[in-house]
């Protein structure tokens, strides 16, 4: 259990809620930002002292029952609830796969995909492998050395290049998703040195990343299509389907378009054209 991360997460979620969000009356001269600690404690059915000790990084590890009560009191989403349990110590650490090494099951599925853009990403946000259509759409993202191999590092340190295929209005949403992914990876494997180095470097070099990191964003399922702007065919609207390896150290992302749509026609065109992939 990481007491500091747990305390920060609870504090961030508490301050994001208003009394009316949870059915409490708002006092006329209320100055508190978000809910008070005693209000969260009452909503969770526990003593104010016990809840305060958690936010103050004191006391024993909260039980799963108490965590569930806090999650309900704070109106956490399912993804946020799972994150709460992980940072409180109720999850197993994950291992980061080596560069270019796929788990057997992920490899078998990946090798069957040729009509849709597909890629495998590890906990460091490194694209372990891309198929041809993914490379045509996004460029070869497996060629970078060092920290720049991580998509997250390039996104925050070289935004002009990395964000070019995506509309400006989508950048904030993508930034939040990337930070949420790294935060999840960090809570699951705190002993991985490459992950720690990546996060430490981003906290030091990117104010945007630092601000988002301290908001403790949590990955949510995003049903919105991904808009990619390609130099040859223009806008392509894609849906992302994600399949995780059993240990969740890698995930396979497959991009699909609506059947019969203009975007599907563009993918068909790109798959048929001979591109010089550099």
Image (cartoon, rainbow, N blue to C red):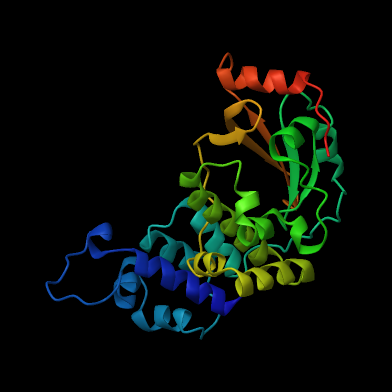
> Residue 255's quadrant in the figure?
top right
Q: Position of residue 253 (x, y in %)?
A: 69, 39
For the point 53% across and 73% down, the residue is 6
Q: Nearer the viewer, residue 52 or 35?
A: 35
For the point 80% across and 28% down, the residue is 275
Position of 10 with respect to 97 (left or right) is: left
Position of 102 with respect to 44 (left or right) is: right
> Residue 252's quadrant in the figure?
top right
For the point 64% across and 62% down, the residue is 157
Q: Nearer the viewer, residue 106 or 198?
A: 198
For the point 70% across and 18% down, the residue is 269
Position of 105 with respect to 226 (left or right) is: right
User: In the rendered image of this protein, does residue 47 appear above or below residue 108?
Assistant: below
Q: Nearer the viewer, residue 220 or 155?
A: 155
Q: Position of residue 116 (x, y in %)?
A: 71, 27
Q: Position of residue 78 (x, y in %)?
A: 49, 51
């Amino acid at each position: 259990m990481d007491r500091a991360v747990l305390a920060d997460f609870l504090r961030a979620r508490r301050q994001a809620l208003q009394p009316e969000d949870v059915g409490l009356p708002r006092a006329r001269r209320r100055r508190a930002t978000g809910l008070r600690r005693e209000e969260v404690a009452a909503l969770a059915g526990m003593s104010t002292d016990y809840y305060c000790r958690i936010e103050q990084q004191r006391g024993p590890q909260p039980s799963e029952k108490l965590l569930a009560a806090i999650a309900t009191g704070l109106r956490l989403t399912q993804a946020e609830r799972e994150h709460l349990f992980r940072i409180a110590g109720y999850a197993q650490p994950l291992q980061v796969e080596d560069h270019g090494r796929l788990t057997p099951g992920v490899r078998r599925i990946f090798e069957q995909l040729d009509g849709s853009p597909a890629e495998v990403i590890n906990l460091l946000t490194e694209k372990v492998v891309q198929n041809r259509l993914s490379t045509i759409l996004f460029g070869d993202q497996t060629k970078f050395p060092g920290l720049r191999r991580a998509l997250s590092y390039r996104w925050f340190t070289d935004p002009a290049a990395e964000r070019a295929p995506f509309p400006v209005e989508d950048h904030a949403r993508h930034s939040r998703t990337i930070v949420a992914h790294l935060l999840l990876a960090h809570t699951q494997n705190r002993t991985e040195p490459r992950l720690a180095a990546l996060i430490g470097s981003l906290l030091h070099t990117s104010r945007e990343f630092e601000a988002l990191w301290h908001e403790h964003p949590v990955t949510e399922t995003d049903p919105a299509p991904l808009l990619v702007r390609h130099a040859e065919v223009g806008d392509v609207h894609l849906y992302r389907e994600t399949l995780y390896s059993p240990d969740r150290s890698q995930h396979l992302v497959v991009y699909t378009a609506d059947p019969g749509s203009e975007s599907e026609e563009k993918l068909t065109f790109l798959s048929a054209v001979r591109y010089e992939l550099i």
